[in-house]
């Protein structure tokens, strides 16, 4: 059965004031002020995944999130040309090298989040050869997680652990670009084929017929047969985790850039309608799309920022004649204005208040998180200039 395209809520047809260059510049200035306040504390260590009591604790090589800090620094360098950001980002390459040398927390699909935003962009932006070599080593490790029978990249853990084999997750849509990049860089077709097959399996099994998404899905690695979908961070197995939906919106749209497969932007569109149709009055999503206002659930501002990046990427791929372009533009304006006006974290670490990392495991609830910061800045950069994505 095919995936449905919901009609978009008519409230997105109401014309919104566009985000002017002056508005975007002011929002970027706020971002740079916040990065500047954090920079002296994070030149050899990284902000933790989530803030605590208004500050990001300092960590080193422990999580899937360290690349978001270098990503923020590279964005800051791109918009200002100020060498302090570039020097700090390059200085942190040592940490990404040590991580590979010591095989520290690399049994994960998150190698894309980590090495695209630290090494691939350092290579692309400055021609740093060491960064390129590190990124290729990370791509090799990511490729080893690909199971040829199931056709998916195993999300987490030891490759010989039967409980984890054949499990893919929607977040991995943002990690496959590391394999596509590495394949283009080296001509290694196996890497490209793995990335293509993983994206195809993600579109087949992680997306439900109503255009919502499972967070995770298991396939049998002996037969390749689909087993079941479930959640890791969502409210329930059959609900729709807001950030997972946003990873899908952005990741499937990005997949088009590498595959030319026109079904991927259409899938991104379907996920986007499902997402946009479930936003509360202020257009900033709850942490799971199952919630209504009477549930008084927390928001996840990070999912909102990722979704905006997904919509901007989708707009790049749709023809100018697409009749829904104005509605998507309105949605982007509404979300970004409200993030800036009501959720910006003035005077504390982080850019966006009210993110949720993992509600079920009591992690990072209702506080800034590093990927929310990164994608909010990425959204502003995407909207303010012609920009080549790091993905
Ligand atoms: N990729 C993990 C998360 O979105 O929390």
Image: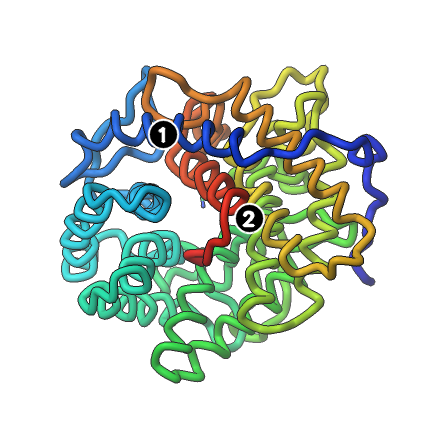
For the residue pair 219 and 30, the one nearer the viewer reads as 30
Furthest-front residue in this view: 22
Q: Horizontal and vertical percent for residue 68?
A: 35, 44
- Secondary structure beneath dot 2 equals helix
Residue at 85% in and 44% down: 7
Badge 1 residue CB within 8 Å of ligand 1: no
Badge 2 residue CB within 8 Å of ligand 1: yes
How far separated are the C-alphas under marks 1 and 2?
18 Å
Is mark 1 in CB contact (under 8 Å) with mark 2? no
Residue 45 located left or right of residue 234: left
For the residue pair 215 and 70, the one nearer the viewer reads as 70
Residue 321 located left or right of residue 141: right
The quadrant in which residue 35 appears is top left
- Secondary structure beneath dot 1 equals loop
User: Residue 50's mark?
Assistant: 1
Q: Residues within 10 Å of mark 1 (few under 14, many from 20)?
A: many
Q: Horizontal and vertical percent for residue 155?
A: 44, 56
- Work out whether mark 1 precedes mark 2 in sequence or the reverse, and give the earlier one: 1
- Compared with 241, 208 (above or below) is below
Residue at 46% in and 41% down: 375
Residue at 36% in and 29% down: 50
* Residue that carries the numbered disc 2 in the rendered image: 247
């Amino acid at each position: 059965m095919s995936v449905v395209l919901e009609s978009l809520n008519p409230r997105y047809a109401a014309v919104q004031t566009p985000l002017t260059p002056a508005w975007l510049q002011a929002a970027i200035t706020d971002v740079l002020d916040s990065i500047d306040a954090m920079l002296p504390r994070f030149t050899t260590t990284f902000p933790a995944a989530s803030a605590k009591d208004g500050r990001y604790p300092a960590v080193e090589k422990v999580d899937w999130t360290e690349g978001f800090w270098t990503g923020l620094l590279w964005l800051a360098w791109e918009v200002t040309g100020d060498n302090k950001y570039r020097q700090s980002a390059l200085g942190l390459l040592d940490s990404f090298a040590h991580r590979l040398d010591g095989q520290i927390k690399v049994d994960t699909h998150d190698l894309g989040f980590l090495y695209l935003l630290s090494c691939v962009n350092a290579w692309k932006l400055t021609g740093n050869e060491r960064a390129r070599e590190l990124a290729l080593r990370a791509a090799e490790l990511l490729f080893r997680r690909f199971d040829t029978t199931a056709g998916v990249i195993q999300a987490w853990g030891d490759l010989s652990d039967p409980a984890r084999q054949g499990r893919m997750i929607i977040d991995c849509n943002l990690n496959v670009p590391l394999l596509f990049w590495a394949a283009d860089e080296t001509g290694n077709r196996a890497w490209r084929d793995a990335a293509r097959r993983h994206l195809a399996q993600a579109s087949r099994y992680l997306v439900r017929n109503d255009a919502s998404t499972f967070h995770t899905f298991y396939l049998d690695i002996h037969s390749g047969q689909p087993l079941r979908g479930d959640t890791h961070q969502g409210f329930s197995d059959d609900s729709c985790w807001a950030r997972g939906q946003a990873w899908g919106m952005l990741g499937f749209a990005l997949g088009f850039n590498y595959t030319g497969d026109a079904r991927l932007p259409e899938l991104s569109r379907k996920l986007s309608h499902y997402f946009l149709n479930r936003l509360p009055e202020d257009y900033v999503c709850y942490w799971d799309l199952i919630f209504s206002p009477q549930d008084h659930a927390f928001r996840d501002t990070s999912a909102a920022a990722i979704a905006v990046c997904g919509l901007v990427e989708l707009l790049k791929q749709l023809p100018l004649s697409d009749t829904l372009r104005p509605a998507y533009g309105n949605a982007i304006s509404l979300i970004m204005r409200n993030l800036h006006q009501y959720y910006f974290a003035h005077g504390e670490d982080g850019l966006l208040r009210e993110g949720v990392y993992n509600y079920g495991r009591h992690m990072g609830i209702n506080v800034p998180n590093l990927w929310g910061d990164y994608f909010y800045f990425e959204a502003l950069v995407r909207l303010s200039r012609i920009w080549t994505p790091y993905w």
